[in-house]
Amino acid sequence: VYEILARTVYGKRRRAEVGVDRLINEGVYKAAFPLHEGPFQLPKYGVCPEELNQRQVLYHYWARWYKWYKYQPLDHIREYFGEKIAFYFAWLFYTAWLLPAAVVGTLVFVSGVMSMGTNMPKEICKSGGSYLMCPLCNTCKAWNMSDICTMAKMGYLFDHPGTVFFSVFMSFWAVTFLEYWKRKMATLAHHWDCMDFHEEEQERPRPEFAAMAPTMEQNPVTGVKEPYFPEKTRLSRMFTGSMIIIMMLCVVMIFLVTVVMCRGIISVMMFHTGSPVLRTEAGTIANISGSIVNLGLILLMGRVYTALAEQLTKWMHRTQTQYDNAFIFKVFIFQFVNFYSSPFYVAFFKGFVGYPTNYGTLFGMRNEDCGPGGCLIELAQQLFIIMVGKQLINNIQEFIIKMKAWHQKHTLSKVLGGKASQEPRRWEKDYQLVECEGLFEEYLEMVLQFGFITIFVAAFPLAPLFALLNNWVEIRLDAHKFVCDYRRPVAERAQNIGVWFNILEALSHLSVIANLQAFLIAFTSEFLPRLLYQYKYDNELHGYVNFTLAYAPLNYTEFPLCYKAYRDNNGNYTLFYWELLAVRLGFIIAFEQHLVFFVLRAIDWIVPDVPESLELKIKRERYLAKQALAENQEALL
Amino acid sequence: VYEILARTVYGKRRRAEVGVDRLINEGVYKAAFPLHEGPFQLPKYGVCPEELNQRQVLYHYWARWYKWYKYQPLDHIREYFGEKIAFYFAWLFYTAWLLPAAVVGTLVFVSGVMSMGTNMPKEICKSGGSYLMCPLCNTCKAWNMSDICTMAKMGYLFDHPGTVFFSVFMSFWAVTFLEYWKRKMATLAHHWDCMDFHEEEQERPRPEFAAMAPTMEQNPVTGVKEPYFPEKTRLSRMFTGSMIIIMMLCVVMIFLVTVVMCRGIISVMMFHTGSPVLRTEAGTIANISGSIVNLGLILLMGRVYTALAEQLTKWMHRTQTQYDNAFIFKVFIFQFVNFYSSPFYVAFFKGFVGYPTNYGTLFGMRNEDCGPGGCLIELAQQLFIIMVGKQLINNIQEFIIKMKAWHQKHTLSKVLGGKASQEPRRWEKDYQLVECEGLFEEYLEMVLQFGFITIFVAAFPLAPLFALLNNWVEIRLDAHKFVCDYRRPVAERAQNIGVWFNILEALSHLSVIANLQAFLIAFTSEFLPRLLYQYKYDNELHGYVNFTLAYAPLNYTEFPLCYKAYRDNNGNYTLFYWELLAVRLGFIIAFEQHLVFFVLRAIDWIVPDVPESLELKIKRERYLAKQALAENQEALL
């Protein structure tokens, strides 16, 4: 039964309102899937390559670990799995582009390590007890500037002129990569002959949609009568959907505040333990544990929301493509806020604490200050935990799928074990495999990673390196999963990677246009204050630390305490503060906004989306087609 | 002879290496043109509309003055003149979009007039002799603040909160208009069935190109042997071309500096006449006469450059379309700098003069300062002269064409007068008309006008009104010219308005992305200083004038003199200056950059380039074509 059903589905390549899908939904059949071409294991004794089946070829030349240095056989993948999956693996070629970014990022990091001692204001370590600083929280004690010597040195790793260069480099990298990918997509689509493939025209309504639709209406394109939702109910459903998204985003924000408060509490607790080590590292410990809690919440919320989004999208969209796009968009918007809100908060909002006698508060608790090493190092820590932690958990999930596959195989082979004498047939073997879960999770992971790299790279130059390592593993893991562990998925045609490309482009635009990187460098890093001080006062940064400190007002404590700000004794901003603010804003406008942005626009504008040679080919084909049509017409007359 | 030739050309609609064009070039024939359908004059006695020829219909319903309130009959224009010219007149529909902009602009201007006395610092007019100001040039004398009372009131017309609103409004207007135009273009192209018209594929090489090309090569699309330029010489020619453009731009810059110096000399001369009227108005007179000289130079340079560009482009491009695009691009780049450099200079560079004892100089002459009314009013004057002057001169040119037509008709009819008895034949009559000069000049004028409106509108809210009046005249003038004065042009197919649309888009992007309007409001207008003063010190602007003035250093003169700047007695900037600078830059980033730009991107992204109903139609057609093809194939088998 499987085989026949599977073949029917494979032959038709579309989902109908009636048919196998419905029968499976109603529990008549347990599964329907196309068959693999044979075992993936290579025969024990030597066999010439021509005799291998497609699956064995893919396994042998692609899905094994020690092929890690090879390009991927995209044509073979396409032949076996269809264009949609082949485009996913083609997109993973992004890994190769990560290589230069990772190299430059590592170089920047190493140069930071090398010059750690040299270009830093030396007063921090040498000051001894001369700078007594205001406590960082209400119940904390005053501390000495010299206590944070190591922290400040660490902070320099992520906050030196190299990061500015790297941030510009990565802007160019992102835009160049997307340009390249557009061309690559066009080339592949032409090569696979699916350039003129218009999904919507060839798709039938989804069964869920058809079941829910109250009326029938003529399809304006094909003229066939089809299930139809009136415009009116559509609007109200959209409204409900948006409301739920907004509600969920509020929940994310509430969790964010919770984590912030939890961090504050941990930090206060650390101070009260009395241990000197815990006290100096209080901020770091609070930050790291806070980030881990945050990561847990992010993943939990992601799960909950994805399930919810599936329910929300279920009966809204006519075709599978529309459904997929809406679902992807919904989940991405949410995950974007979910993943990036916490780094955003650290990067752009954590610094604003007010000043002694006039601290800002949140629910009666004093606003968090960044640790003594600066906000940038906290951001780097958090990015490291979220990004690398997410990757680790993802890889663990992949492992769980493997376990599941093994378990399913084990239990099913026991059931089939009764008629042990005969070899189980192909469909029985394939039925033991795990059902293919689609590419949604895979793409989402990659896109979020791309976002981390393009938006926050100024704070964490090692991000591309970690991404590279992760993806190198990811490619072969995915390959192995598709070849060995999954039932063969129904091959689907596609013209490109679909809505994911729009999301990638939006991400890269966001980071460049919204100037997030420039804001990060201008406001979060100490690059500009140092530069301005060097320009105005002392090229060697002598006296810089003293210059950045202000005395707390006398009614705050009985003896003079310092805090970091450019303020006079009454708490008003000094002239230098305003100069610095003007320089910061000028930097954002002049440097990133105009320089980088114009160059990027120019690249986008000059580089054609379709390679010239391909363009010529397409024109030639169109010309020949026209000629042939004309001749055909004449012949008919 | 004419008639046959004319018909041949009209039938083929393409220019060949051999053929009529070449024969005309070599002087064998004097002209070749399609014939008009008959006289444009209406018959004296009543005739029913069905009996009118196309030309009469166009004349009657379109090309006459008292049809000024009517929409244009685009389908008829297309039928008679071809798609290319019809698209030009469709684009002139931009005039209708100018209506709301002109209304809002006028309202903003009127509201400025109404509130002229109220929201202005009153100290200027009431100060009497209390503010003695530093002289505006080296040989000028000190002057009283109260002298410029009228000027300051005038300045307020162009510099009040309404202009900020209007500038935002116009950003939206420009982007919405372009979105609308994209959709309109698509609809027209579909309606006229030229959506899939690919010019390059159907065009033959231009005769000039063919004559110059050293080798023959196979055309990669059609496979036909064609004249060909090797890549190598192409590069060197491009290099020469760019060098010449850069040289010409340098000449423009030199002229700009000349005008600046000339303005300075005029202003000094005015001061030395001794007449008190001339002295107070010296700046204005100098500015106006300078602008007129400038306009003359602009038009002269434009002429010279266009001739040069024709020579430069002549043997570079294979097809007529490529040639046109390259020529348009070349001339536009030049004219852009030519027309806008002088307003640019006034808007963004004229203010920087230094301060007493430390003036900046240029070739030994002290840098120009803006007149006492502020830079914005000078900018408005200059825009008025350049924009309205240009329009007047253009309309005079149109008139000259009419004169030429009349003259040509007159002399030719004399020649033909010999055989007076018989009515001259159609081709003889048409030969008496002027040859059609193409749409280049018309488009260029409109595009430059669009640039003035989108880039400098903050300084001159009446610009859309003047543009509207001009275009209203322009439509009927052009219509009349095409119907009555020109020989009928060879009808050409086109898919849209071509490269002009890219230029329009680039202009609107430039004004929004490069933030020119925001820079203008932030730095050239007094909007932000006033706002900050109101916020920090006094809501009624009491003491504002005094606050903006600084005393010149004591070594400059023996008694205290004022100048406009936020400086202390040593010439250093005050805290307020830096605050203001931060506010200005913050305004640029926050307001225009993020708010306006994001909303505009969103509009661009959300509004589809092709209307939904048209999209459905296209899909339906494609579906039916595919069906028909499939049936045809089956029938053949």
Image (spheres, coloured by chain):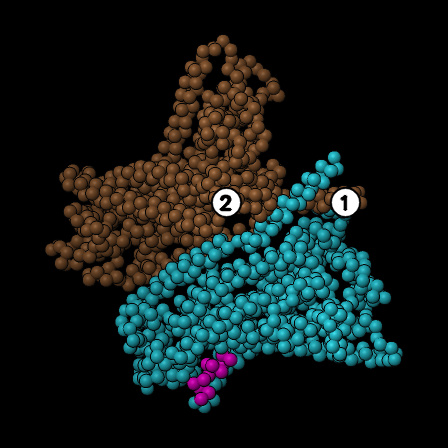
Chain colours: A cyan, B brown
2 and 1 marks on the same chain: yes
Q: Residue at x 29, y 73 (%)?
A: A539
User: Residue A448: horizontal and vertical position, in percent?
Assistant: 57, 68
- Side of B612 relative to A517 (left or right): right
- Side of A434 relative to B479 (left or right): right
- Side of B511 relative to B83 (left or right): left
Chain letter of mark 1 equals B
Amino acid carrying label 1: it is Gln
Q: Quadrant of the C terminus of chain A?
A: top right
Mark 2 or 1, nearer chain start: 2
SS state under label 2: strand
- Side of B84 relative to B140 (left or right): right
Question: Which residue does the numbered mark 1 point to in the structure image?
Answer: B633
As rendered, which of A627 and A435 lies closer to the eye? A627
As rendered, which of B115 and B449 lies closer to the eye? B449
- State yes or no: discs 2 and 1 in contact (Cβ < 8 Å): no
Using the rendered image of the protein, determine whether residue B158 is visible from the camera's viewpoint: no
- Is A458 magenta? The answer is no
- Is A286 magenta? The answer is yes
Question: Which residue does the numbered mark 2 point to in the structure image?
Answer: B215
Amino acid carrying label 2: it is Thr
Answer above or below: position of A163 versus A271. above
As rendered, which of B198 and B158 lies closer to the eye? B198
User: Which residue range is magenta in the image?
Assistant: A277-288
Q: Residue at x 83, y 72 (%)?
A: A425
Instruction: Tell me which corner region of the image, top left, top right, bottom left or bottom right, holds residue A398.
Output: bottom right
